[in-house]
Image: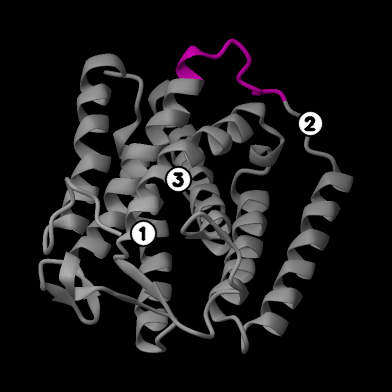
Amino acid sequence: MEIPFLFPRYAYLEIDSLIFFPTLIISLLFLRGKRDYKALIKSILIVSPLYLAWDFIATWKDSWSFNPKYVLGLYVIDLPIEEVIFFFVTPFATLLIYDFLKSYSLKLNNHVNVTRKYKQIIFLISIILIALGIIILPNYSYMGMDLIYLSASLLTSLVVYSKLLLSKIFWEFILLSYIPFFVFDFFLTSLPIVIYGDKSIIGIRVITIPIEDFIYSFSMLTFYITFYEHFRNCNNYENSN
């Protein structure tokens, strides 16, 4: 499928630019002083390498590959430079939604009660997800790793920022994040820029988007928000002393 404004060789770079520059302008014009860039950078520096490592291994194992027709041809090992850039521009842009919700919401869920039962439920769900991921991994590598990373993101949120999954704003953010996700992932999978291997996905798609991509996005954003909130709280504590 051809998309008129996405040109051969430059398509992936165009997508990165469409993700980054509009949100940069919005941040500067409408959320000046309401985004914690220090916390955001720290979160990106922790989480992005986790997904880049998976990306390197998946490309090496042929779980997925990148269509040379739509990339510049500059590579970091086996990854197009645009794919590396993606893991930095995406959290910057997507977390804008979260910052907007927190800035303009009257209910910030600051006094959520994290119970022992809640922790036990999240821990049990995480263990089940890991087990399923390990079982599925040999036949469907993307779905298997999806479930393992999803489990890790839930456990990390429980340890680092335990009230995250109890926050209404977090779930509103996740739902809203799927709007730009659907647009840009459609671009990536319809041209296609990303090509999935035979033993990678289970084959269920929403139009052109594999169901695994939805799980991938959820786990990645959970990681980003967990560390973003953690470092933002640390910065607020330092500034108050």
Q: Is residue 236 magenta?
A: no
Tag on residue 166?
A: none
Q: In screen coordinates, is 29 left or right of 125?
A: left
The amino acid type of the residue labelled 3 equals Phe
Report the residue at 58% width, 68% height from top: 146
Name the front one of labels 2 and 3: 3
Name the front one of labels 3 and 1: 1
Alpha carbon separation for disc pair 2 and 3: 33 Å
Name the residue that disc number 3 marks.
Answer: 182
The amino acid type of the residue labelled 2 equals Asn
**The residue stretch that appears in magenta:** 102-111
- Looking at the rendered image, the quarter that the N terminus falls into is bottom left
Alpha carbon separation for disc pair 1 and 2: 44 Å
Q: Secondary structure at mark 1?
A: helix
Q: Nearer the viewer, residue 152 or 185?
A: 185
- Give neighbour class at mark 3: few <14, some 14-19, many 20+ (Cα, 10 Å): some
Name the residue that disc number 2 marks.
Answer: 113
Name the residue that disc number 1 marks.
Answer: 190
Q: Earlier in the sequence, mark 1 or mark 2?
A: 2
- Looking at the rendered image, the quarter that the C terminus falls into is top left
Alpha carbon separation for disc pair 3 and 1: 11 Å
Q: Nearer the viewer, residue 150 or 112?
A: 150
Q: Secondary structure at mark 3?
A: helix
Residue 69 position in % (x across, y down): 17, 71
